[in-house]
Image (spheres, helix red, strand yellow):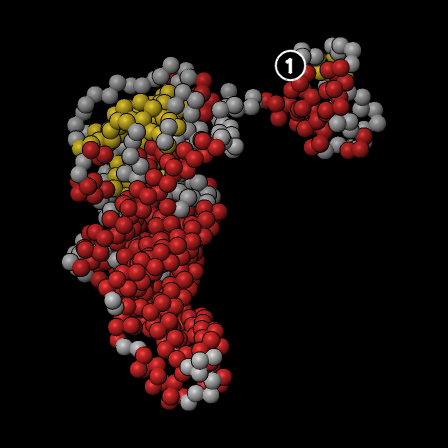
Amino acid sequence: MAEIRTQKDNPDVHIAVRDLTMAYGSFVVQRDLNFSIPRGEIFIIMGDSGCGKSTLLRHLVGLKGPARGQVLYGRTSFWDAELEEQERIKRRFGVLFQGGALWSSMTLSENIALPIEAYTALEVAEIRELVSYKLALVSLAGFEEFYPAEISGGMNKRAGLARAMALDPEILFFDEPSAGLDPISARRLDDLILELRDSLGTTVVVVTHELASIFTIGNDSVFLDSESKTIIASGDPRELRDESRNPKVHSFLTRGES
Amino acid sequence: MRHGLPSANEVLQEIEFGPPVKRLVFDTKGLTDWDSGLLTFLIKIARQTAQRKIVVVASNLPEGAQRLYKLATAVPEKTDTHKAPARMSLVARIGVAGVDFTRGTGETVAFLGEAALAFLRLLRGKAHFRRSDLWLTIQECGPQALPIVTLVSVLVGLIIAYMGAVQLEQFGAGIFVANLVGLGMARELGPMMTGILVAGRTGAAFAAQLGTMQVNEEIDAFKTLGITPMEFLVLPRMLALMLMMPLLTLYADLMGILGGAIVGVTMLDLGVVEYYEQTRNSLNLRHFSTGLFKSVVFGIVVAIAGCLRGIQSGRSASAVGQAATSAVVTSIVFIIVSSSILTIIYQQLGI
């Protein structure tokens, strides 16, 4: 049933998940997950609602420990590493949460400046320039002094992306990037993700069930199934759509048509 | 339509106790209009008839109702989604409560440990938080609490003085009202009333702020950036309360004494200077400092309870409400308990 490609231990694997079982107490969400995310790829985690996509993301970004198994960054197992090593790994990635998760008591520029202040020794003026540049990247130039509550949901999300990019991360995680965005903004965000990968070589991991976005940006993926509680397909989403013989995967990727 | 619809139970009883039924047909000749009541009726009947292998002929029903019926029965009911039954046996409930308590205690101890570590980092100048946050919190929990502290303290002073006056006047010792109010406010009631007020005002606010941040994933955002919420969110709040509580308490002490003086001067005909001198003679710095030490402890208790409940909060609006409630309750419980313990310790040490 499972269509899992054999993934050799190639040196360009950025993140590897080994025998990961995720659980809340005794309730198992997904079990025996195995996949690798190559450097510079846009990797999609997809599946129907409630299958544990976002939970998997929380495991990848170090918010929730696994019930069993490992998450490897390069050769380091995140959850077995010392606290300092974990912090060092975390500093290399940026996360865009579903609602943007901007700190509501701070302005956009303060939001983006905070991680920069925390981890670099830059002067105030340099930080200000950097913040303006990051905001310009997500087409929010001029919104420095706005509070998150004063701008729209889509803008919040883009500002969240600017904050995720503040420290020039090697890996960017997106939780449902197009949720709550109008089609054009969603498309622009997709373009931005592609642009970031192409220009900076960032590895991108996207949790989504938005088909348009899956086919536009994804070049590798895993499909989580809520019934068998594990991965039932993996690979290039376009190939999966055209070739997968698994009825669930096929109907998901074709919206149940044909 | 509704009054025309027989209850599903009647129909089912008819089927069960009446002559054996093979087919079920609906007579819809008089049907003019229908609503969801018809569908729930159909679904209930269908569930029973399916078990008894009775054929249901639905073709008489209005077309819209037939389509909705199909839609509602298209996906079989998911059976593994039902939560565990809400009613548990007494033993099970005691067990669950015990496990919850143990886990809660563990979390609290871990939180206290982390808070202590964060405090040590602060003392070594390594803690990371924004000074502007500290000032903002100081502003919110200090000066802005003055009106309510004034009102409550003056009235509490007044009440003690009244009650004391009635008793002490019988011995002609009305002047000792000043001692009663002064000592009572400085040692016990000043810190305790301020602590409870701050718990309701500021502790609840802390829990609601952090709880909402939890809902918005703002706390997660801190964690993924390697900034510990403990340093960035809890430490400034704890510091602000540790600084503001003694000041508010001192203010409350003075306001309470003022309240006592109002009674002394108006009801007992004592002179203002007389009352003042009596108060001064009865109080010394030690009395104030024991109360102020208590207030620092209460400040820490309120800050920790508020922040702990906020960070533990679930991800929904009602969870934030519960967090705020729980923060106030926890604060007040620990204020009263720690106040009693400190009073006993003072007594034993003779201070």
* In this view, B180 is above or below A228: below
Q: Is residue A206 visible?
A: yes
* In this view, A197 is above or below B149: above
> Looking at the image, which residue sits at the far front?
B171
**Mark 1 element type:** helix
- Quadrant (top left/top right/bottom left/bottom right) for the C terminus of chain B: bottom left
Q: Position of residue B83 (x, y in %)?
A: 49, 30
Closer to us: A7 or A134: A7
* In this view, A33 is above or below B141: above
Q: Is residue A95 left or right of residue B30?
A: left
Closer to us: B313 or B4: B313
Local packing at callout 1 (Cα closer than 10 Å; few below 14, some 14-19, many 20+) is few
Q: Is residue B85 left or right of residue A65?
A: right
Residue B33 occupies which quadrant of the picture? Answer: top right
Q: Is residue B151 visible?
A: no
Residue at 61% across, 23% down: B73
- Quadrant (top left/top right/bottom left/bottom right) for the N terminus of chain B: top right
Q: Position of residue B283 (x, y in %)?
A: 30, 77
* In this view, B3 is above or below B108: above
Closer to us: B118 or A186: B118
Residue A21 occupies which quadrant of the picture? Answer: top left
> Looking at the image, which residue sits at the far right?
B30
| Residue type, label 1 | Gln
Q: Position of residue A174 (x, y in %)?
A: 34, 39
Residue at 65% across, 20% down: B47
Q: Position of residue A23 (x, y in %)?
A: 35, 30
Q: Residue at label 1?
A: B51
Residue at 33% across, 43% down: B105
Q: Chain of mark 1?
A: B
Residue at 47% across, 50% down: B321
Closer to us: B138 or B176: B176
